[in-house]
Image: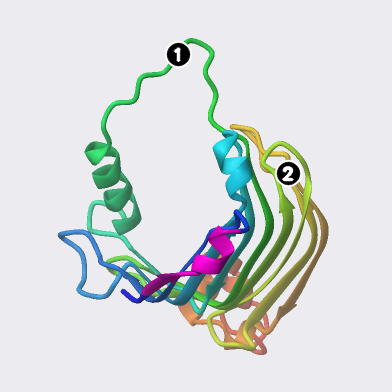
Amino acid sequence: EGGDFDIAEWFFFRPAISFDRLRVGNPEGFGAEPLLAADRVAARATLTDLLGGRVAIQSVEILAPKLLVEADAAGRTNVQALLDALKGAEAPAEKGEGSEGPEITVDSFVLRGGEIRYTAPGTEPMVVKNLNVEIRDFNPEAAFPLVAELDLFDEEALHLTFDGETGPFTPKSSPASGTLTIDAHPGRLPEAFRRQYMGDFLASPGGGSTAG
């Protein structure tokens, strides 16, 4: 809901479109909360490149997105259900021998104030908060700069930052190099999470280790 576009930029071959209060509903069989919600999603492309068969995006901006990843009793997620539904709705495309998709580049990608919540039956929700991502000169066939940060669970429980580069991507690898900084306070993490991923040694931080 709430989309608009900039007419003036079309005359300069830089079409822009934005959506305010974007909502993507959950597939049938999952909860009533939206799968995805965002305060604003905006993008601008270069029309001359689009006409030439090259997808050149000048900028993408996503503000306060909230993604709900919900698994059912069989382990299937709402995201997979949505992708399957979209795939089933697509008309079969004719592919020529040796045909390739268009080249895609993005000059600037910015995501601010994101949140990801994962829920599954019988487990405590896992929440990523304050997700911020900035990418420059994105090209899947080359390395490009990436700066990201996030908080896991409580804002002071586990804070991660990455400053470096990633790419080029292949079907079997997503290389990255840079500086990863982790600021962790295990005592503020949920006990079940500590036991599952850190073992009994940190099950009760501050209480000493136990040996069985």
The reply to whether discs 2 and 1 touch (Cβ–Cβ < 8 Å) is no
- Please tell me which residue is depicted at 41% across the width and 18% down the height of the picture: 95
Identity, as a three-letter code, of the amino acid under mark 2: Gly
Identity, as a three-letter code, of the amino acid under mark 1: Gly
Q: Position of residue 147 (x, y in %)?
A: 74, 66
Screen quadrant of the N terminus: bottom left
99 relative to 70 in the view: left or right:
right
Judge by depth and name the residue closer to the eye, 56 or 93. 56
Q: Which of the two discs, 2 and 1, labels the residue nearer the N terminus?
A: 1
Q: Which residues are magenta?
A: 3-11
The answer to whether residue 55 of the structure is visible from this angle is no
> Where does label 2 land, which residue?
167
Q: Position of residue 91 (x, y in %)?
A: 26, 31
Screen quadrant of the C terminus: bottom right
> Where does label 1 land, which residue?
96
Judge by depth and name the residue closer to the eye, 157 or 29. 29
Say which quarter of the image contains residue 10.
Answer: bottom right
Q: Position of residue 39 (x, y in %)?
A: 45, 80
The answer to whether residue 191 of the structure is visible from this angle is yes
